[in-house]
Amino acid sequence: MATKLLQLNDLKLHYDILGGVLRRPVNSVKALDGIDLSIYRGECLGLVGESGCGKTTTAKAIIRLEQPTSGEIIYHQNDGSGKSVDIASLSRRELINHNLRRKLQMVFQDPTSSMNPRMLVKNIVAEPIKVSQSLSAKQQEELTLNLLQTVGLDKHHLLRYPHEFSGGQRQRLAVARAIATKPDFIALDEPTSALDVSVQAQILNMLKDLQEQFNLTYLFVTHHLLVVKYISDRVAVMYLGKIAEIAPTKTLFENPRHPYTHALLSGIPVPEVREKPSRIILQGDVPSATNPPPGCRFHTRCPFSIDRCHQEEPQLNQISEGHQVACHRYQEIPQLAEAKFGSHYL
């Protein structure tokens, strides 16, 4: 039975908007507004949604690059003690004392901007090793070379600068740096979005191999639903700072229950040219995160909304094993979607 690595409870992260002569808070951007999410040890959880919905903010909050406004991020330690710690409540010093900076890592979307252009590769990859381990210079160099070889590079790359590499090679360097501290968890923030399709496949296969080799747990943030389908064990769909639906990958693609999930899946390109599939085109823009609508966040664009959706915020309901959805009409959605858009819109 899978064990939890991380548990997010009512996690909120609001960014203050300052105004007036004294620059006091006058409002806030509600980037995360009550996230409940479980991440199990050894799995890859895909996190999808439109730009600005809070995907990257969730990843940054988990590894404490951002300080949550409220809520809990419970990390269950794997040291045999059975203890857990609330990451959200720890100070910077306590994060280091609990060794969490080593156990929680992140790979950013743009590997170029996440590396010092004036540092050699051997120093970029070795830097987290120096911070987390007491090794001799020779041992550090051997470990650095081993990490490069693990991600498909070799000793000839040690004395080069980041700008001398292709996009795919730079992303391999970013992954090598992330696994240097032997972490439990890695947040992958759209690691393949800036790469060619052939290179994307190589990086995804490498990530799968590393996950199996080092027993890693991933949070995979992306817009690309087919990438999620390939690499993820479960998928969480976000909309305007809220979780709309969570399910095992196969279940989500075959039996989506949230209207927003239906809309996302209908946008997947289909190679069949003889029959043009229907698309669910959402009307209007995403509401402002500074003043989200009452009730269901999605009701302003939902083709199936009713009065209840405008007034009452839906909670995540368990509708089957591992499948949760935040929608008042989740039982009717498959029939409503088929009646409105046809049975072959996906």
Image (cartoon, rainbow, N blue to C red):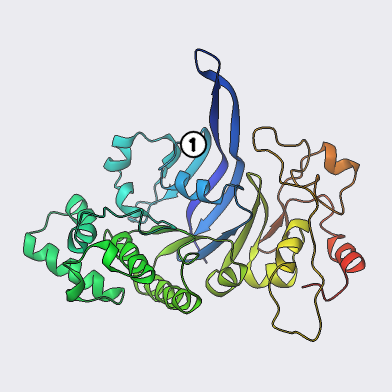
> What amino acid does circle 1 point to?
Pro
Figure quadrant of residue 331: bottom right
Residue 105 image offset from top left, x and y in percent: 36, 54
Q: Is residue 143 placed above or below 28 in the rendered structure?
A: below
Q: Residue furthest top?
A: 21
Residue 256 image offset from top left, x and y in percent: 74, 65
Q: Left or right of 117: which side holds 212?
A: right
Q: Is residue 28 placed above or below 130 in the rendered structure?
A: above
Please count the marks in the image: 1
State the residue position of label 1: 68
Please rate how many residues cluster around mark 1, counting C-alpha atoms within 10 Å: few if below 14, some from 14 to 19, many from 20.
many
Judging depth in this view, the residue of 11 and 289 nearest the camera is 289
- Residue at 60% x, 52% y is 51
Figure quadrant of residue 13: top right
Q: Left or right of 193: which side holds 271?
A: right
Residue 237 image offset from top left, x and y in percent: 65, 57
- Residue at 32% x, 48% y is 101
Q: Quadrant of the C terminus?
A: bottom right
- Residue at 7% x, 65% y is 138
Q: Is residue 184 placed above or below 75 in the rendered structure?
A: below
- Residue at 84% x, 65% y is 334
Q: Residue furthest right?
A: 339
